[in-house]
Amino acid sequence: MGQAPVVYGQSNRPPRGDYSRASADYTCPQNYASYTEADHDTYRRLYERQCALLPGLASQAFIDALPLLGARDRIPRFEEVNERLYQATGWELVGVPGLIPEVPFFTLLANRKFPVTDWIRKPEEFEYIVEPDIFHDLFGHVPLLFNPVFADYVQRYGQGGLKAEGLGACEMLSRLYWYTIEFGLIREPAGLRAYGAGILSSSGELAHSVRSPEPQRLPLQLERTMRTRYKIDTYQQTYFVIDSFEQLFDMTAADFAPIYERLRGLPEFAADERDAVAA
């Protein structure tokens, strides 16, 4: 038992989470007894705040699935969510101490296991936290895993990630994850809506992504997305828009190896680089 902590990007702060609890695949049991009443209250307040912001901004599929998380006044138990989730789409949640390496991450997704950080932010981090915590992972990601098409897309992403690692293309593929699973927008009959977890768990970026005139919104194209850098410490300056989860799933059916080869010789797009075609 025990794994080395994981850091992505540059940071002078040590990673959060107790990695001494992690098994070989970086998973660990949810230490439910460790949550304090203050932890549960933080989760409740985050949940209530985000719920109030969802109408007119979040994907209807997300809004419809959100009650399946269960408890909203306390941190849910993973095993209770799993009873419903596995029946719906064959997925299950597994605890992790924090960020995990790419190969274990891809392997879990490829096997329909979604890693959820088991610690929650401190009250003083209520508005912003650098690393994803249990609220981001549960509230932002898990509801759409109840959607069969989106759940299949996430598994396909994990399978593709394992192939990309062998081809030295993880950076390109990570941008697809960022601009779909984390910061994706979808055009629904009622208008533009957010489905990415990074948006749905953020109080400020939810309105910014859907309504602000500042960012550009482009139709999702694999090669443009994989060439586009992104920001981790500010609101996104570019978003990519899909028309349906079926479109997203079908778009990622092809073998990406030829795409990676084409992109290796092409310049990248800056996160704020404007495009002639907007969504």
Image (cartoon, rainbow, N blue to C red):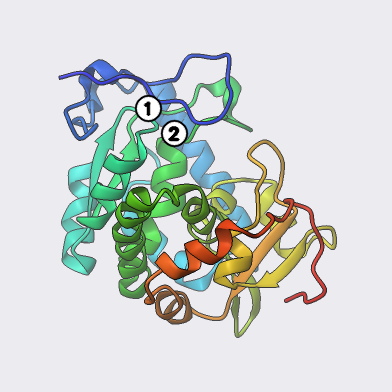
Left or right placement of residue 199 versus residue 205 in this view:
left
Q: Mark 2 or 1 closer to N-term?
A: 1
Residue under the point 70% across and 71% down:
218
| Residue positioned 78% across, 77% down in the render | 277
Mark 2 neighbour density, 10 Å: few (under 14) some (14–19) many (20 or more): many
Q: Residue at x 36, y 68 (%)?
A: 153
Measured as percent of width and height from the top left, residue 41 is found at: 45, 30
Residue 110 image position (x, y, % from top left): 25, 56
Residue bearing mark 2 = 133
Quarter of the image holding residue 21? top left
Q: Please say if 19 is above or below 153.
A: above
Whether residue 106 is visible:
yes
Snapshot quadrant of residue 68: bottom left
Q: Which structural element holds mark 1?
A: loop
Residue 55 location, quadrant = bottom right
Check contact, mark 2 vs mark 1: CB within 8 A.
yes
Give the quadrant of the C terminus.
bottom right
Residue 179 x, y percent position in the rendering:
57, 58
Residue kind at label 1, given as amino acid type: Trp
Residue 54 seen anywhere in this rendered image of the structure: no
Secondary element type, mark 2 = loop
Q: Residues within 10 Å of mark 1 (few under 14, many from 20)?
A: many
Residue 278 image offset from top left, x and y in percent: 77, 74
Name the residue carrying label 1: 119
Q: Is residue 94 above or below residue 164?
A: above
